Amino acid sequence: MTKGKQKKTGETKTGVAAIVGPPNAGKSTLLNALLGQKISIVSPKPQTTRNRIAGILSGDSYQVVMLDTPGLHRARKPLNLEMVKTAVACLAEVDIVLFLVDVSLPMPEKQLQSIEFLDSSTVPAILVLNKIDLLKKNELLPMMEAYGKMYPFAAIVPVSALFGNGTDVLLEEILHLLPAGPRFYPDDIPTDATERFIVGEIIREKIFLLTGQEIPYSTAVLIDSFSEEEAKKLVTIHATIVVEKSSQKAIIIGKKGSKLQQIGKNSRHDIERLLGQRVLLKLWVKVHRNWTRDKRFIRDLGL
Ligand SMILES: Nc1nc2c(ncn2[C@@H]2O[C@H](COP(=O)(O)OP(=O)(O)OP(=O)(O)O)[C@@H](O)[C@H]2O)c(=O)[nH]1
Ligand SMILES: [Mg+2]
């Protein structure tokens, strides 16, 4: 669906679409489903995505740059404020907004709150009702009607990002709203993110999946070095997991280093798949006291 050579004739629809919405709605899962490949990390915990991540969707007659964004929420901590700022900034620089909600939640306060963010946007918005696999059939129509009353959406599209249902209809609706224009990227590039960045994200994802409570939210990953030895077909990566206090460092390391080993093993598996090469991954854990409040450090993380 997403791949194909550029036609010599005929017009190409191009533009930029932002996927925005409350935390945990499935924005990153949708980006991966549209691309047919995983570039953005996913976890069952909210506030997994921290940066703007671009996926490039190329087909015979279109090229759409899709921006995955951090979840819109009422933030207080500097890290979270920067995350929300990143998402809101995307609203201003795109041609289309895909506003994604989780239909398995009863239209709660949080989803309504984040619809308010659309008031600052002047571009057409498509409402994407995600996780329809969790809904009974007769529940969908009333939900579409209720959401439809909240904002003048250009279209409402039910999908299951997890199972890839409805994503073809969504793409049609997006193309319907896009103008003809020149391509921004070669067709075979799925993202503008660097391998280095994605490697850091993979490690962060494993921490989200393997640790609880505040640990994932107190963790950042820095790639210290990334060196390829072509002769050995081996990539050696050194990375530092940054936490906010020493008690968190002990948790990440685990009994006799078991937790850190598990994080390393699961990360390496995914990184090898990403790079198509063997990987030697060395992880360190470092305390940077209260880094989630350190604006300069947050900026260094690319936010
Ligand atoms: N059942 C079901 N689960 C889904 C679907 N889409 C996403 N999920 C799950 O929802 C959870 C959150 O998915 P993410 O893609 O990380 O959500 P997100 O909106 O990017 O979250 P943040 O980055 O934290 O804002 C994960 O456990 C996904 O597997 C879906 O269509 N159906
Ligand atoms: Mg995400």
Image: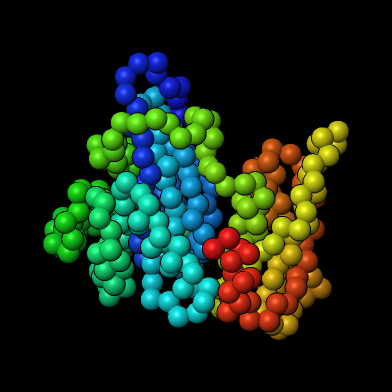
Residue 71 x/y as whole percent: 42, 65
Of all residues shown, which one is farthest toward the top?
8
Q: Does residue 21 appear to the left or right of 76 in the view shown?
A: left
Q: Is residue 34 visible?
A: no
Residue 172 x/y as whole percent: 28, 36
Q: Residue at x 18, y 61 (%)?
A: 151
Residue 123 x/y as whole percent: 26, 51
Q: Does residue 53 appear to the left or right of 259 in the view shown?
A: left
Of 197 and 15, nearer the camera is: 15
Q: Residue at x 49, y 69 (%)?
A: 82
Of all residues shown, which one is farthest toward the right?
231
| Quadrant assignment, res 70 | bottom left
Residue 104 x/y as whole percent: 31, 63
| Quadrant assignment, res 10 | top left
Rendered-image quadrant of the C terminus: bottom right
Q: Does residue 100 appear to the left or right of 183 in the view shown?
A: left
**Which colour style is shown?**
rainbow
Q: Is residue 149 above or below residue 60?
A: below
Q: Does residue 131 appear to the left or right of 140 in the view shown?
A: right
Q: Residue at x 67, y 50 (%)?
A: 196
Q: Residue at x 27, y 75 (%)?
A: 109
| Quadrant assignment, res 262 | bottom right
Q: Is residue 290 visible?
A: yes
Of 222 and 264, nearer the camera is: 222
